[in-house]
Amino acid sequence: MSTILVTGATGTLGAPLVTRLREQGHEVRALSRHSAQYPVDLRDGSGLDAAMAGVQVVVHCASNTRGAGKGDDLAAGHLVRAARRAGTVTNVVYISIVGVDVIPFGYYRMKHTVERLLEESGLGVTVLRTTQFHDLVAQVVGMAARLPVVPLPKGVRVQPIAVEEVADRLARLAVPVAAGRVPDMGGPETRTLVEWGRLHLAATGRRRRVVALPLAGKAYAAFRRGANLAPAHAVGRGTYAEFLARRV
């Protein structure tokens, strides 16, 4: 069994990942600024050296999702330098998003920047890109549904995947031997956001008119082209309807 450090360990993906790793018998260091044992702040790197001591595998799930990834490159830099100083890390596993290299969207660009930073670090690296989580689709639709009419981007298709399945995959990748860029993961179904929105509203018992809203810009055009999709890697099994049924 390995000693594994997980960033973003209390998040949507990090929490189920930590559970799986511990069930497999690994020693898991779940990083948080408020952790009693390993208080770490990735923004300035404080606490990282103590947390990294003796670690073989790092799984990097932390990201500033609310701030469009602001500071994620600095956090990754602190992580890389601490891993080098530790001298025991042989694999840094990073969770990324399908299309980060071709969609000119701020958060995606930052994810791609972190990918490159890790790949150029000299450390062993494993990168997994997935399509959007079910939770993100629910969040987008839920926010839009606060209005009397629900506006969603016209012609944007999404292929959502269950976060639990991504956690399973990351747990299998969290081994001492790095695998490089591994095959993408996509959900089992692809529909437009408008279609997902109508399904979401029906499942939650809300009556709203969904409006397909055309947008502008290069990022929107890339989404409309399907650059965020992984049709050749539709390996997910859990459907959005099943996700909604559990939530409701």
Image: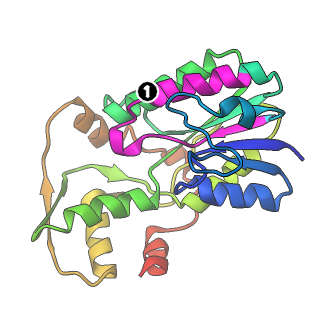
> Foreground: 238 or 149?
149
- With respect to residue 157, does 101 lie above or below? above
Residue 47 sits in quarter: top right
Q: Mark 1 belongs to which amino acid?
A: Asp
Question: Residue 30 appears at what percent x and percent y?
Answer: 67, 49
Segment tinted magenta in the rendering? 57-83
The percent position of residue 247, horizontal first and vertical second, equals 45, 77
Magenta span has 88?
no
Residue at 57% over, 55% down: 10
Using the rendered image of the protein, determine whether residue 94 is visible from the camera's viewpoint: yes
Residue at horizontal 49 percent and vertical 44 percent from the top? 230
Residue 38 quadrant: top right
Q: Is residue 67 magenta?
A: yes
> Which percent across, then down, holds residue 125?
69, 27
Q: Which residue is mark 1?
A: 101
Which residue extends farthest front? 36
**Quadrant of the frame with the C terminus:** bottom left
Residue in front for this viewpoint, 87 or 199: 87
- Of 96 and 54, nearer the camera is 54
Q: Residue furthest bottom?
A: 205
For mark 1, give the secondary structure.
Answer: loop
In x, y percent, where is residue 142? 28, 66
Q: Of residues 187 and 142, which is closer to you in this image? A: 142
